[in-house]
Image (spheres, rainbow, N blue to C red):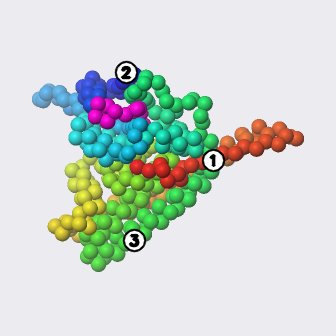
């Protein structure tokens, strides 16, 4: 199948096309899907300077492979090196894992196969059976159960960070703050798109959040150099706070990040509670539809399963 390249500009399209070609040669995927794209354009011009136009294109791509061996980290590392006009966040799963998830009513994979743009297919065909539809039954209750668990963890880590900050234990504070953000991202992703991620890298987690909203990403990545420095410090703390004796954090930086992450926990709660209400309405609408299809005097049994909590859907 010929690759279908997204084309915001010729220059970016050529770079993206070249990257996809090299990615296919390196990893031999069965399919590549574009789950989301975010395009930011900037134009500078004036009578005293040469006109400049810049464009940043960020993507979230789903790679389906034949082999069950996980290659997420290798693929992400390849993208970080070779794609230079933005960021690409990858989700990678084997064909068998995806097929099994779809057969068990996975909200994420059914929606991705139905609606995501197919960039590449090894045999020229779309792999999805269009007759398969997601059946919203216990979606809201599953999402709420996951949310309650993760937001409790996030709140606990945040409280621990505040205590460490009060006791001048800034390195431990940073690790606690990292864990709070990680749990928030995990529950945001699970509640909004039904995907269970086990990624620890905050850049990748926020990249996955961008598949449904820019708000989590923009709370940290405002465009200022200072906020980028603080975010990089937070990312670095996951390993260095535990294993590097040279890792250090100033009280001022710890306070700034604690305030930012307190706001992030509040944002997570607001977004998740709002979306759970939407999911509950979808579940109710589906149940009402099913009830309307059952005619008086007839017995009709409809059995469905919702597998949003399937442990194999991990990244």
Tag 1 and tag 3, C-beta contact below 8 Å: no
- Front residue (pair 122, 220): 122
Above or below 32: residue 160:
below
Residue assigned mark 1: 305
Nearest to N terminus: mark 1 or mark 3: 3
Nearest to N terminus: mark 3 or mark 2: 2
Q: Read off the magenta span.
A: 23-38
Q: Secondary structure at mark 2?
A: loop
Q: Position of residue 237 (x, y in %)?
A: 26, 62
Q: Tell me how far mark 3 sits from mark 2, CA to CA.
A: 52 Å
Q: Residue at x 34, y 33 (%)?
A: 28
Above or below 256: residue 283:
above
Q: Position of residue 99 (x, y in %)?
A: 52, 39
Residue 2 tag number: 2
Q: Residue at x 18, y 69 (%)?
A: 245
Magenta includes 25? yes
**Residue 232 picture quarter:** bottom left
Residue 159 tag number: 3
Q: Secondary structure at mark 3?
A: helix
Nearest to N terminus: mark 2 or mark 1: 2
In the rendered image, the residue lying farthest to the right is: 297
């Amino acid at each position: 199948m010929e690759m279908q390249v997204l084309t915001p500009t010729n220059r970016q399209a050529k770079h993206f096309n070249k990257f996809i070609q090299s990615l296919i040669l390196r990893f031999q995927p069965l399919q590549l899907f574009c789950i989301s794209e975010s395009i930011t354009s900037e134009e500078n011009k004036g009578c005293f300077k040469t006109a400049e136009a810049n464009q940043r294109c960020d993507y979230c791509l789903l790679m389906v492979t034949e082999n069950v061996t996980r290659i997420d980290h290798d693929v992400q590392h390849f993208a970080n090196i070779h794609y230079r006009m933005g960021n690409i966040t990858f989700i990678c799963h084997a064909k068998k894992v995806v097929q099994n998830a779809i057969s068990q009513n996975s909200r994420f994979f059914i929606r991705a196969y139905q609606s995501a743009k197919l960039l590449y297919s090894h045999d020229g065909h779309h792999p999805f059976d269009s007759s398969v539809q997601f059946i919203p039954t216990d979606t809201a209750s599953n999402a709420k159960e996951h949310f309650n668990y993760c937001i409790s963890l996030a709140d606990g880590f945040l409280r621990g960070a505040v205590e460490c900050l009060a006791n001048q234990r800034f390195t431990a504070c940073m690790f606690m703050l990292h864990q709070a953000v990680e749990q928030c991202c995990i529950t945001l992703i699970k509640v909004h798109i039904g995907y269970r991620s086990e990624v620890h890298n905050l850049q990748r987690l926020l990249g996955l959040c961008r598949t449904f909203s820019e708000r989590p990403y923009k709370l940290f990545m405002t465009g200022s150099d200072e906020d980028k420095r603080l975010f990089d410090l937070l990312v670095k703390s996951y390993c260095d706070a535990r294993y590097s004796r040279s890792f250090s954090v100033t009280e001022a930086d710890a306070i700034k990040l604690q305030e930012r992450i307190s706001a992030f926990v509040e944002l997570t709660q607001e977004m998740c509670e709002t979306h759970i209400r939407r999911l509950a309405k979808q579940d109710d609408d589906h149940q009402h539809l099913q009830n309307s299809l059952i005619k008086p005097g007839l017995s009709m049994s409809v059995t469905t399963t919702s597998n949003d909590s399937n442990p194999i859907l991990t990244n």
